[in-house]
Amino acid sequence: MIRYSFITILLLLASFVLQQFLPAFTGAHDSRVLLVQLVFLCCAVTVGQPTMLLLAFIGGFLWDAQCALGPHGGDPLIYTQEVESLRFGYSILLFGAMGFLMQGIQPLFKQGKWQFSALLSGIAIMLYLAAEFSIVTFVRGGWIINRDIVLKIAFSALLTMLFSPFVFWLLFRVARACGHSINPEAGRRRRRTA
């Protein structure tokens, strides 16, 4: 269990590196695959609550360090007036909320029904992006939502969800290599029917 948890932390850290090389899909309203959030969500359903909270802290902290820090209000050539910035650490709370959502369907995952987790990862990404957009617009003092923003959120969630089977496949391989069962009830059922 400890080895598997340590490897999930390493996978989350590796996803930060790979995220830098993933382009935006300009044909799909500049949507992008959010690999960091996807790896976190897939790992969150396979580990216990303490490990999930550790992953949420690491993921949210590094996401804020990567995205929230920088020039106040964005690029000073584009944004001539300073705007209130988001407080460092808000992503930790959003990651934690997504993790608890995934933990809620962990009993289904342990029965071998990983497809529900894959579907919920897309829903969780959509909720994460909507919450992040709401927080940013609230801090900046205006609520501007249009069709392009909704489509960007929807396409980003859909594209990210399409990669979840690969991440789950990788996690099943890692669990097998560590001698750890991430869905023990499914294994017991297979042995009974054989």
Image (cartoon, rainbow, N blue to C red):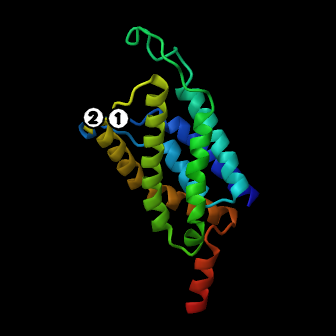
Residue 20, position in %: x, y?
Answer: 47, 32
- As displayed, is residue 145 above or below residue 171? above
* Residue shown at the point (37%, 34%) measured from the top left: 23
The quadrant of the image that shows the N terminus is: bottom right
Tell me if I can see residue 134 in this picture.
yes
Disc 2 residue type (three-letter) = Thr
- How packed is label 2: few (under 14 Cα within 10 Å), some, or many (20 or more)? few
Q: Which mark is residue 26?
A: 2
Q: Tell me which corner region of the image, top left, top right, bottom left or bottom right, holds residue 145.
A: top left
Residue 55, position in %: x, y?
Answer: 65, 46
Disc 1 residue type (three-letter) = Ala
Task: Please indicate whether residue 59 sits to the left or right of residue 31 in the image.
Answer: right
Q: Which mark is residue 24?
A: 1
Q: Secondary structure at mark 2?
A: helix
Q: Secondary structure at mark 1?
A: loop
Instruction: Give whichever of 87, 58 is nearer the camera.
Output: 87
